[in-house]
C-alpha cells in the first residue's frame, strides 16, 4: 500500500523537507523580519525582586502615550485558567503587575519607542516603589509555608494536590527489598532559537485586529486574546508565520501579547514586542523542576511490585491559560509508572506556587522528569539486588503479548514490543565491548560507564485524556481542508502549525499517499486563523496523528467525486474505473487530475449532469477511534567516560531505538529525535536556572546558562521499530517529544555505572562537574568514616 | 536589550585614540573586536558616552619580528595568530586555536582580551607564563608592563583612562623549551572552569607555571615550577600542587580545588609529553 517504501513520496518515504530551502537560505519570514509603516517597538520594565507589594508606579510628565502601567489598560482582564480538578486554586496574572510582583522579571510597566533601544530608554525613566516580601524559592518548603503566600487569597501555596492509590498495600507487602531515593530536576528555560514575538495592528479594511505571533497554537491564541481583551473572536485574526521552535513555550497566552494587542487597539497603529534572550532566561525559566521521594518495593530478583511516590512540582507564580498548571502534575501522576508491569502504585503529587516564572509544559511534559525518576529507580533496584540493571529493566517491561495493556495508572498502552527495543539498544550499543573496556581501564584514567533508559510516550492524547486534566479547553476533532487546483495541484489547510516538525512535507506526503500528487505540487497552508480550519494547535505530539489523519480523510473524500467526473470524461461507467496513481483509469484510457480539474474549473460543459456539487474541495475531521493516546516508546543506551579529576562527562556513544508506529518520513523522525535528544542532553548535563535565597536567578545570558552545542551532542544513532497503532490513520503515532524524555535518565544511569566502584550515585540534574566531584568526595569521606568505625 | 545611545569615534592612529580617551576620562571606552564589550553594551552593563574604535588603526594590526621576540599588535585577532604560527613562539597559535569559537576568534583581538581581563581568559594566563611584556600608550607616553602584572583583579587592569594597549612582546623560546597548556571547559568554546600553563625553558633558565580561572588574575605557582624544572613531572605531587593552590587561592571548595589541581598537573604532563 505504501508508496513511500518503493522510493516514492508517500508514507515511509525519506524525502527532503520542503521547508528547508527557505531556512537554509535565510529567507524564512519571522515576526522579527516584519516592519510595517509607523510600527512602534515595545519594551517591558521588569521586576528586579522576586516577591514584593507593588506600592506605586510613576512615569515622568509628558510620557503618557509612551509609558504604560496596569491602571492604563482596564480593558484587559487578568489571565486566569480555571480547572475542574477538585483541589485546584485559581491564580490571576495581570498583563502588567497589579498589587504584587511574584517573580524576578515580571512586567511592571511597558514603554513604546521608534526603536527598541528608545523604548528601553523610556523604561529607565519609570519609578516604582516595592515593599519587599520574603521569597518562596524552595518548593518543598513553600508547600508547608502558610505565613508567606504567593497568592494571598489562598490559605497555603498549593495550586493542587493529586493522588492515586491502586493496589499499593497489597503489592508492597509481598516485597523482599525496599529501595528509597530522593531525585530532583533543576529549573530550565526552553530556549527556542527564536524567542517570543508579537506584532499587532488594526486592519481597517478587514475591521479586525491582526496579530502576527510566534505562537504554536494560533487558533487557541485567538480564543485567548478575544477572551482577555473582551473582543468577539471574529474580530481577531492570528497568523503564525515562520516560527523558530516552540517546545511548549509558545502555546499559551502571555501578558505581553495582551499588552501589545491593547496598544494596537488603543492607538490603531502597529506595535511589536520581541522577547530577547535575557528576558527569556530570566522571565521564562519555567520548566522541568520536579522533586521525587520514591520508595520501590521489589522481589529479591528485582521484580518491581509496588511504587510509592511523593512528587513536588515547582509551579512558579502563575497558572497559564489554557493548559493550566494542572497539566504537569497530572502527567507526573499518570505517567510515572512508565513502560513497566507492576500492580501497586501509590502516588501523591503536589504542585506548589513559588516566586519563579509560572511553570509551562516543555517538550516531554513531566515525562522527562518521571522517566528520570523511574529509570534511576530501576537501576537502584538492580544494585540493591545485585543484578545487572539491563536484566532488571528487561524483566519489568510490559511484554508484547500483554498488548494492549492497561497499566497501574490506568493508561491504555496500545501496541508495541518494549523489550525488543531495549534488547536492540543493547545490541546496537555493543554493550559488551564497552564493559570489556570498562574492565580494562582507560589509559587516561577516566571511568567508562554504560546506561539504559526505556520509556513510553503518550502521544496524540484525545478528548477524554484532556478532560481528565480539568483544562478549560479540550481538543476534539482536527479538521483539514483540501482543494484541488486547476492543473492538478493540491492545497492542504490545517489548523496546526509547523515550526520545525517538517509538516509542510509530511502532511504533503500523506496527501500524496491518497491522491498520488507530486509533493512539490502540494501546498500546505498552516498558521493562519483566517484561512485554516480550527485546531487547538501543535503540542503534545499530536499533529501528525490528528491533522495528518484529517488530511487523509479529506483527500479520500475527493476520490469518489474524481471517479465520477473521470468516468464521464472517459465515456464509461463509474463501475469501470478505479483511482490509482493520481488518475482515474478506465478500460480505454486515463483521466488525469489535470483533466478533471480543467473540467471542473474551466470546462464545466464537460462535467456529468450528476456531478457532486461539493466540487473539488473537502473539509473533513479526524479523531482516533480510541482517544486515550497512541503510545510511542523507545529505549536509549549510552556509553560515557567520566573524568573523576575534573568531573567532566563525555558521551562516547548514544543509541536510540524508537517505535513511533508507521513512519511517515524516517528522516523527519530522526531529525525530531536528534533535536529532542540534544535538549535532553542539556537537561542532563548543562541547563539550569539557579536561584539564590532571595529568588534571584543566577543566569541571564548564555555565559551562565549553558546549552549543549554541536560538539557536545555526539553522532546519535537512531534505529526504528514499526508497530502500527490500531487506532490511527496508517497506524501513525506522534513522536515530537520523545527524544527529550530519556537523555537525563540514560546519562545518569551510565555515570552511576561508571562511578559505582567508588560508591557514587548521582540523582539531581544537571550533572555539573561540581556535582560529580562533590559526590565523589562525599563517597570518599563516607568510606573513610566507615573504615575508621 | 539594546545599547543605550553613545557617540562613536573611529581613531585614525594610536595618538588619535589616546587623545579621544583623554578628552573624556572615564566616559570613553576603546572598542577592539567587540566580542565582550558588544554584549556588555547591549545589556547596558557598559554605558560609555563615547566609543573609540581601534579596529582601523593600522599599526595595531602589525606582527613584527624583533629577533629575540615577536611584537604583536594589540589589534591582531585570535584567528590571525591561529593561522600564522610564529617561529620560536609555537604556543601562541596553539593557544589561539582553543579560544572560544572560530567566529569569535575572527573578530576578537589579543589586546581586547587582555584589556577586558576576564579571569578565565586564555591570553592573560598564556602570556604570563610566556613572560611576555605588554606595551601601553597613553597621554604621558609609552610604558611596558610584564603580562603577569597587567591584570589587577577580575575585569580590572593597570590601564589608565587615557591608555590603550598597543602591543604584546613575546620572547622567543629556547630550542629545548617545553610548553604545557591545559584548560577544562564544560563545553567547547566556553570560558574554562580551570586552566594552567607551564613554560620550561632551560636555555633561558625559566620555569614559569601559572594557574588561571581563579577569582582574579592568573597566579604564579613558583615552588611547583621549580620542583618540576628540577625533578620532572613527577615532582608535582598532588600534595605540593594542592598546597600551592591553597596559597594563591585560599578557601576553594573541594570540587573547585580538585579541578584546578587537575589542570595544573595536566599542563605539567603536557609539557613533558
Image (cartoon, coloured by chain):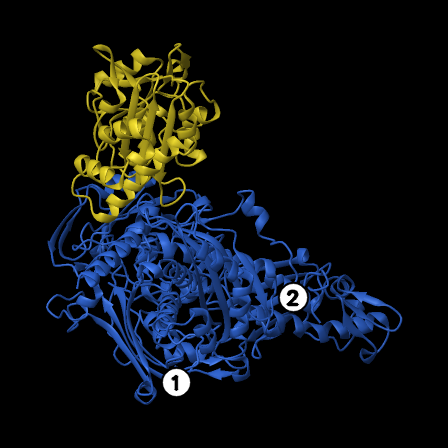
Q: Residues within 10 Å of mark 1 (few under 14, many from 20)?
A: some
Visual hue assigned to chain A: blue
Q: Picture coordinates of residue A9 (x, y %)?
A: 68, 61
Q: Which chain shows up in yellow? A: B
Question: Which dot marks residue A780?
Answer: none
Which chain is disc 1 placed on?
A: A
Q: Quadrant of residue A142?
A: bottom left
Q: Which residue is mark 2?
A: A11
Q: Look at the numbered disc 2 and give the secondary structure of its residue.
A: loop
Question: Which dot marks residue A343?
Answer: 1
- Which residue sits at x=51%, y=55%? A500
- Quarter of the figure that contains the N terminus of chain A: bottom right
Q: Picture coordinates of residue B3 (x, y %)?
A: 30, 35
Establish if B11 lies above or below A184: above
- Which residue sits at x=46%, y=64%? A737
A644 or A743, which lies in front? A644
What's the distance in space between the residues labelled 2 and 1, CA to CA?
Answer: 38 Å
Number of numbered discs overlaid on the protein picture: 2
Residue at the extreme bottom: A170
Of circles 2 and 1, the one toward us is: 1
> Relative to B97, is A414 on the left or the right?
right
Q: Earlier in the sequence, mark 2 or mark 1?
A: 2
- Which residue sits at x=59%, y=47%? A21
Q: Quadrant of residue A53?
A: bottom left
A679 or A466, which lies in front? A679
Q: Quadrant of residue B27?
A: top left
Q: Look at the numbered disc 1 and give the secondary structure of its residue.
A: loop
Amino acid at each position: 500500500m505504501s508508496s513511500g517504501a518503493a522510493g516514492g513520496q508517500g508514507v515511509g518515504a525519506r524525502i527532503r523537507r520542503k521547508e528547508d530551502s527557505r531556512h537554509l537560505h535565510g529567507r524564512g519570514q519571522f515576526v522579527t523580519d516584519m516592519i510595517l509603516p509607523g510600527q512602534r517597538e515595545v519594551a517591558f520594565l521588569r521586576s528586579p525582586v522576586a516577591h514584593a507589594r507593588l506600592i506605586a508606579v510613576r512615569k515622568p510628565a509628558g510620557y503618557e502615550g509612551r509609558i504604560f502601567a496596569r491602571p492604563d489598560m482596564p480593558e484587559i482582564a487578568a489571565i486566569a485558567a480555571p480547572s475542574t480538578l477538585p483541589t485546584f486554586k485559581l491564580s490571576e496574572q495581570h498583563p502588567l503587575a497589579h498589587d504584587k510582583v511574584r517573580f524576578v522579571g515580571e512586567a511592571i510597566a511597558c514603554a513604546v519607542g521608534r526603536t527598541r533601544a528608545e523604548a528601553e530608554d523610556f523604561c529607565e525613566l519609570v519609578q516604582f516603589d516595592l515593599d519587599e516580601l520574603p521569597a518562596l524559592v524552595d518548593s518543598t518548603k513553600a508547600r508547608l509555608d502558610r505565613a508567606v503566600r504567593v497568592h494571598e487569597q489562598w490559605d497555603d501555596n498549593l495550586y493542587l494536590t493529586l493522588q492515586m492509590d491502586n493496589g499499593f498495600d497489597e503489592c508492597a507487602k509481598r516485597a523482599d527489598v525496599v529501595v528509597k531515593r530522593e531525585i530532583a530536576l533543576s529549573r530550565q528555560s526552553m530556549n527556542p532559537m527564536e524567542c517570543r514575538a508579537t506584532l499587532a495592528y488594526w486592519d481597517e479594511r478587514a475591521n479586525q485586529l491582526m496579530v502576527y505571533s510566534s505562537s504554536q497554537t494560533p487558533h487557541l491564541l485567538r480564543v485567548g486574546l478575544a477572551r482577555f481583551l473582551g473582543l468577539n473572536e471574529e474580530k481577531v485574526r492570528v497568523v503564525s508565520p515562520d516560527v523558530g521552535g516552540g517546545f511548549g513555550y509558545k502555546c499559551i497566552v502571555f501578558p505581553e501579547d495582551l499588552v501589545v494587542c491593547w496598544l494596537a487597539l488603543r492607538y490603531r497603529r502597529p506595535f511589536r514586542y520581541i522577547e530577547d534572550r535575557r528576558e527569556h532566561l530570566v522571565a521564562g525559566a519555567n520548566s522541568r523542576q520536579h522533586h521525587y521521594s520514591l520508595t520501590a518495593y521489589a522481589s529479591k530478583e528485582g521484580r518491581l511490585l509496588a511504587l510509592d511516590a511523593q512528587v513536588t512540582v515547582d509551579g512558579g507564580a502563575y497558572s497559564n491559560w489554557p493548559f493550566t498548571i494542572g497539566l504537569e502534575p497530572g502527567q507526573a501522576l499518570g505517567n510515572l509508572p512508565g513502560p513497566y508491569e507492576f500492580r501497586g502504585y501509590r502516588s501523591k503529587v503536589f504542585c506548589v506556587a513559588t516566586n519563579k516564572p509560572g511553570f509551562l509544559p516543555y517538550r516531554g511534559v513531566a515525562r522527562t522528569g518521571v522517566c528520570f525518576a523511574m529509570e534511576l529507580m530501576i537501576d537502584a533496584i538492580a544494585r540493591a539486588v545485585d543484578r545487572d540493571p539491563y536484566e532488571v529493566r528487561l524483566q519489568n517491561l510490559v511484554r508484547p503479548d500483554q498488548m494492549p495493556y492497561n497499566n497501574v495508572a490506568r493508561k491504555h498502552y496500545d501496541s508495541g514490543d518494549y523489550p525488543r527495543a531495549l534488547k536492540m539498544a543493547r545490541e546496537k550499543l555493543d554493550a559488551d565491548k564497552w564493559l570489556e573496556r570498562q574492565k580494562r581501564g582507560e589509559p587516561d584514567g577516566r571511568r567508562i560507564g554504560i546506561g539504559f533508559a526505556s520509556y513510553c510516550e503518550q502521544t496524540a492524547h484525545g478528548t477524554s485524556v484532556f478532560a481528565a486534566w480539568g483544562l478549560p479547553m479540550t481538543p476534539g476533532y482536527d479538521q483539514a481542508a483540501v482543494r484541488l487546483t486547476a492543473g492538478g495541484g493540491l492545497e492542504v489547510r490545517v489548523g496546526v502549525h509547523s515550526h520545525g516538525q517538517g509538516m509542510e512535507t509530511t502532511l504533503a506526503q500523506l496527501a500524496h499517499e491518497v491522491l498520488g500528487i507530486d509533493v512539490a505540487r502540494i501546498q500546505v497552508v498552516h498558521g493562519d486563523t483566517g484561512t485554516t480550519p480550527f485546531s487547538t494547535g501543535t503540542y503534545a505530539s499530536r499533529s501528525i496523528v490528528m491533522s495528518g489523519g484529517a488530511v487523509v480523510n479529506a483527500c479520500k473524500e475527493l476520490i469518489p467525486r474524481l471517479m465520477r467526473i473521470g468516468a464521464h470524461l472517459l465515456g464509461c461507467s463509474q463501475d469501470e474505473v478505479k483511482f490509482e496513481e493520481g488518475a482515474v483509469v478506465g478500460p480505454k484510457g486515463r483521466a488525469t487530475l489535470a483533466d478533471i480539474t480543467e473540467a471542473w474549473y474551466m470546462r464545466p460543459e464537460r462535467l456529468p449532469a450528476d456531478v457532486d456539487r461539493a466540487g473539488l474541495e473537502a473539509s473533513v475531521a479526524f479523531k482516533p477511534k480510541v482517544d486515550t493516546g497512541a503510545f510511542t516508546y523507545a529505549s536509549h543506551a549510552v556509553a560515557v567516560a567520566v573524568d573523576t579529576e575534573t568531573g567532566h562527562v563525555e558521551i562516547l556513544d548514544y543509541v536510540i531505538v524508537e517505535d513511533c508506529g508507521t513512519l511517515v518520513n524516517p528522516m523527519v523522525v530522526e531529525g525530531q529525535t536528534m533535536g529532542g535528544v540534544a535538549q535532553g542532553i542539556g537537561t542532563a548535563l548543562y541547563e539550569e536556572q539557579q536561584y539564590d535565597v532571595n529568588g534571584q536567578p543566577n543566569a541571564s545570558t548564555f555565559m551562565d546558562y549553558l546549552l549543549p552545542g554541536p560538539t557536545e551532542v555526539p553522532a546519535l544513532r537512531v534505529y526504528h521499530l514499526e508497530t502500527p497503532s490500531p487506532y490511527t490513520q496508517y497506524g501513525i503515532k506522534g513522536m515530537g517529544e520523545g527524544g527529550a524524555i530519556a537523555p537525563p535518565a540514560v546519562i545518569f544511569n551510565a555515570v552511576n555505572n561508571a562511578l559505582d566502584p567508588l560508591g557514587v550515585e548521582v540523582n539531581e540534574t544537571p550533572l555539573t562537574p561540581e556535582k560529580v566531584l562533590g559526590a565523589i568526595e562525599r563517597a570518599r569521606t563516607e568510606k573513610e568514616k566507615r573504615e575508621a568505625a | 536589550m539594546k545599547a543605550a545611545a553613545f557617540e562613536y569615534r573611529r581613531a585614525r592612529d594610536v595618538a588619535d585614540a589616546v587623545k579621544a580617551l583623554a578628552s573624556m576620562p572615564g566616559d570613553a571606552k576603546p572598542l577592539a573586536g567587540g566580542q565582550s564589550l558588544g554584549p556588555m553594551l547591549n545589556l547596558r552593563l557598559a554605558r560609555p558616552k563615547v566609543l573609540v574604535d581601534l579596529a582601523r588603526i593600522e599599526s595595531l594590526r602589525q606582527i613584527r619580528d624583533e629577533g629575540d621576540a615577536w611584537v604583536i599588535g594589540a589589534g591582531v585577532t585570535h584567528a590571525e595568530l591561529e593561522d600564522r604560527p610564529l617561529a620560536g613562539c609555537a604556543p601562541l597559535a596553539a593557544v589561539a586555536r582553543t579560544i572560544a569559537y572560530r567566529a569569535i576568534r575572527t573578530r576578537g583581538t589579543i589586546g581586547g582580551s587582555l584589556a577586558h581581563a576576564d579571569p578565565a581568559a586564555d591570553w592573560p594566563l598564556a602570556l604570563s607564563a610566556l613572560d611576555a611584556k605588554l606595551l601601553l600608550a597613553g597621554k604621558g607616553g609609552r610604558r611596558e608592563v610584564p603580562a603577569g602584572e597587567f591584570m589587577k583583579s577580575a575585569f580590572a587592569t593597570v590601564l589608565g583612562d587615557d591608555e590603550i594597549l598597543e602591543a604584546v612582546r613575546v620572547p622567543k623560546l629556547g630550542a629545548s623549551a617545553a610548553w604545557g597548556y591545559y584548560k577544562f571547559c564544560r563545553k567547547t568554546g566556553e570560558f574554562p572552569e580551570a586552566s594552567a600553563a607551564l613554560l620550561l625553558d632551560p636555555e633561558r633558565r625559566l620555569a614559569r607555571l601559572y594557574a588561571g580561572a581563579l577569582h582574579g588574575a592568573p597566579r604564579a605557582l613558583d615552588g611547583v615550577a621549580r620542583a618540576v624544572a628540577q625533578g620532572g613531572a613527577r615532582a608535582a605531587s598532588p600534595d605540593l600542587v594542592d598546597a600551592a593552590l591553597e596559597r594563591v587561592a585560599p578557601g576553594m571548595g573541594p570540587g573547585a580545588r580538585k579541578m584546578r589541581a587537575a589542570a595544573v598537573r595536566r599542563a605539567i604532563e603536557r609539557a613533558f609529553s
